[in-house]
Amino acid sequence: MPLDRLAKDLRNARGDKPMKECAREIGISTPTVMRVEHGQLPSLAVFVRLCEWLRVSPMRYLRDYSVGPPLAGRDVPQIEVTEGSGSPTAAVGKLATMWEED
Protein backbone atom coordinates (compact mmCIF):
# COMPACT_ATOMS: atom_id res chain seq x y z
CA MET A 1 0.00 0.00 0.00
CA PRO A 2 1.46 3.36 -0.89
CA LEU A 3 1.46 4.64 2.68
CA ASP A 4 3.03 7.91 1.69
CA ARG A 5 -0.02 8.68 -0.47
CA LEU A 6 -2.43 7.83 2.36
CA ALA A 7 -0.41 9.92 4.82
CA LYS A 8 -0.29 12.86 2.41
CA ASP A 9 -4.03 12.67 1.69
CA LEU A 10 -4.82 12.58 5.39
CA ARG A 11 -2.56 15.56 6.14
CA ASN A 12 -4.02 17.54 3.23
CA ALA A 13 -7.62 16.77 4.19
CA ARG A 14 -6.98 17.62 7.83
CA GLY A 15 -5.36 20.94 6.89
CA ASP A 16 -5.21 23.23 9.92
CA LYS A 17 -7.83 21.23 11.80
CA PRO A 18 -6.51 19.96 15.15
CA MET A 19 -5.57 16.28 15.07
CA LYS A 20 -7.93 15.56 17.97
CA GLU A 21 -10.91 17.01 16.11
CA CYS A 22 -9.99 15.12 12.95
CA ALA A 23 -9.67 11.86 14.88
CA ARG A 24 -13.10 12.39 16.44
CA GLU A 25 -14.66 12.95 13.00
CA ILE A 26 -13.06 9.80 11.60
CA GLY A 27 -13.87 7.73 14.69
CA ILE A 28 -10.31 6.78 15.57
CA SER A 29 -7.85 7.85 18.25
CA THR A 30 -5.60 10.88 17.98
CA PRO A 31 -2.45 8.70 18.25
CA THR A 32 -3.75 6.61 15.33
CA VAL A 33 -4.10 9.73 13.16
CA MET A 34 -0.54 10.68 14.09
CA ARG A 35 0.80 7.20 13.26
CA VAL A 36 -0.92 7.12 9.87
CA GLU A 37 0.30 10.63 9.06
CA HIS A 38 3.81 9.37 9.81
CA GLY A 39 3.42 6.45 7.39
CA GLN A 40 2.52 3.53 9.64
CA LEU A 41 0.23 0.84 8.27
CA PRO A 42 -3.31 1.17 9.69
CA SER A 43 -5.52 -1.76 10.61
CA LEU A 44 -8.14 -2.78 8.06
CA ALA A 45 -10.90 -1.15 10.15
CA VAL A 46 -8.97 2.14 10.40
CA PHE A 47 -8.15 1.99 6.69
CA VAL A 48 -11.86 1.70 5.87
CA ARG A 49 -12.74 4.63 8.15
CA LEU A 50 -9.98 6.76 6.62
CA CYS A 51 -11.15 6.01 3.08
CA GLU A 52 -14.72 6.88 4.00
CA TRP A 53 -13.64 10.12 5.69
CA LEU A 54 -11.40 11.04 2.77
CA ARG A 55 -14.23 10.04 0.38
CA VAL A 56 -11.92 7.95 -1.76
CA SER A 57 -12.01 4.38 -2.92
CA PRO A 58 -9.61 2.00 -1.16
CA MET A 59 -8.35 1.20 -4.65
CA ARG A 60 -6.60 4.56 -4.66
CA TYR A 61 -4.13 2.97 -2.27
CA LEU A 62 -4.42 -0.70 -3.22
CA ARG A 63 -4.18 -0.66 -7.01
CA ASP A 64 -0.37 -0.52 -6.99
CA TYR A 65 -0.15 -3.40 -4.52
CA SER A 66 1.15 -6.66 -5.90
CA VAL A 67 0.98 -10.08 -4.31
CA GLY A 68 4.46 -11.18 -3.32
CA PRO A 69 6.15 -14.38 -2.16
CA PRO A 70 4.02 -15.00 0.97
CA LEU A 71 1.08 -15.86 -1.30
CA ALA A 72 3.05 -17.54 -4.07
CA GLY A 73 1.45 -20.74 -5.25
CA ARG A 74 -1.93 -19.92 -3.75
CA ASP A 75 -5.05 -19.40 -5.79
CA VAL A 76 -5.60 -15.71 -5.11
CA PRO A 77 -9.19 -14.73 -5.90
CA GLN A 78 -9.76 -11.71 -8.09
CA ILE A 79 -12.47 -9.13 -7.56
CA GLU A 80 -13.28 -6.11 -9.61
CA VAL A 81 -13.61 -2.88 -7.66
CA THR A 82 -13.61 0.35 -9.58
CA GLU A 83 -14.09 3.98 -8.68
CA GLY A 84 -17.78 4.56 -8.02
CA SER A 85 -18.63 0.85 -7.75
CA GLY A 86 -19.70 1.04 -4.13
CA SER A 87 -18.64 2.25 -0.76
CA PRO A 88 -15.10 1.74 0.54
CA THR A 89 -16.59 -0.33 3.35
CA ALA A 90 -18.20 -2.73 0.88
CA ALA A 91 -15.04 -3.07 -1.20
CA VAL A 92 -12.73 -3.72 1.73
CA GLY A 93 -15.36 -5.91 3.38
CA LYS A 94 -15.46 -8.07 0.28
CA LEU A 95 -11.67 -8.41 0.35
CA ALA A 96 -11.67 -9.29 4.04
CA THR A 97 -14.40 -11.90 3.56
CA MET A 98 -12.43 -13.54 0.76
CA TRP A 99 -9.33 -13.88 2.95
CA GLU A 100 -11.36 -15.24 5.89
CA GLU A 101 -12.75 -18.01 3.66
CA ASP A 102 -9.24 -19.29 3.05
Image: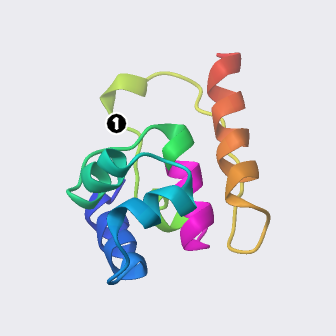
Q: Residue at x 37, y 64 (%)?
A: 6
User: What residue did someone put label 1 on?
Assistant: 68
**Magenta run includes residue 55:** yes
Count the marks: how many?
1
Q: Label 1: how many residues lie within 10 Å, few (<14), some (14-19) or many (20+)?
A: few
**Magenta run includes residue 65:** no
49, above or below 45, in the image? below
Whole-percent x, y for residue 83 in the image? 68, 73
Q: Work out which quarter of the rendered image holds the C terminus and state it.
A: top right
User: Furthest residue to the right?
Assistant: 86
Q: Residue at x 26, y 64 (%)?
A: 4
83, above or below 4, in the image? below
Q: Main secondary structure of the magenta part?
A: helix
- From the viewer's perspective, tell me whether residue 79 is left or right of residue 12: right
What range of the chain is rendered magenta? 47-57
- From the viewer's perspective, tell me whether residue 75 is left or right of residue 31: right
Visible residue check, residue 60: yes
Whole-percent x, y for residue 9 in the image? 38, 74
Q: Mark 1: which amino acid?
A: Gly
